[in-house]
Amino acid sequence: MGSAISSIRNLGPATEAAFRRAGVQTAEALRALGADAAYLALLTAGERPHFIAYSALVMGLQGRPWNDCRGPEKAALRARFDAIRARAAAAVAPDGPPFDAELRALGVLPPRGAK
């Protein structure tokens, strides 16, 4: 079966539920994916991006407190987070982010490719 995701430091029941919705069922599966791929899975499953949640995940997988990241390490982590957000946005839908797709369907935004 495997260990609960919430057994990982900094990750609680809400994060565990979000990972389960994204198809990551156990702490072992999360560790095998790694922080970046696991967070990308969360975003492509529809979770909203939050830097603190991402940094808590990274720190938790290292066995560190969620707020232990500072200075250059935090800046590098922020760059990774921004790259993951960009990849998720590109992977979401050919019509753009879900909100944009809804606005296009309502006629608020022009159809994709229209000038």
Image (cartoon, helix red, strand yellow):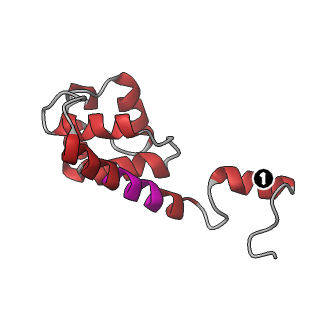
Q: In which quarter of the image is the C terminus?
A: bottom right
Q: Position of residue 56 (x, y in %)?
A: 28, 34
Predominant secondary structure, magenta span: helix
On the image, which quarter does residue 9 sit in? Answer: top left
Q: Which of 27 and 89 is in front in this view?
A: 89
- Identity of the residue furthest to the top in this view: 13
At horizontal 71% and vertical 57% (from top left) the residue drawn is: 101
Q: Mark 1 points at which residue?
A: 103
How many labels were placed on the picture? 1
Which region is colored magenta?
A: 80-87
Q: Position of residue 12 (x, y in %)?
A: 32, 23
Q: Callout 1, which amino acid? A: Leu
Magenta highlight on residue 58? no
- Identity of the residue furthest to the left in this view: 63
Look at the picture and state if 19 lies above or below 91.
above
Q: What element carries label 1?
A: helix
At horizontal 79% and vertical 58% (from top left) the residue drawn is: 104
Q: Which of 33 and 83 is in front in this view?
A: 83
Q: In which quarter of the image is the N terminus?
A: top left
Look at the picture and state if 31 lies above or below 7.
below
Q: Position of residue 61 (x, y in %)?
A: 18, 39
Q: Position of residue 64 (x, y in %)?
A: 14, 31
At horizontal 46% and vertical 43% (from top left) the residue drawn is: 49
On the image, which quarter does residue 42 sit in? Answer: top left
At horizontal 25% and vertical 43% (from top left) the residue drawn is: 74
- Identity of the residue furthest to the front in this view: 71
Compared across the picture, whether 89 is left or right of 29 comes to right
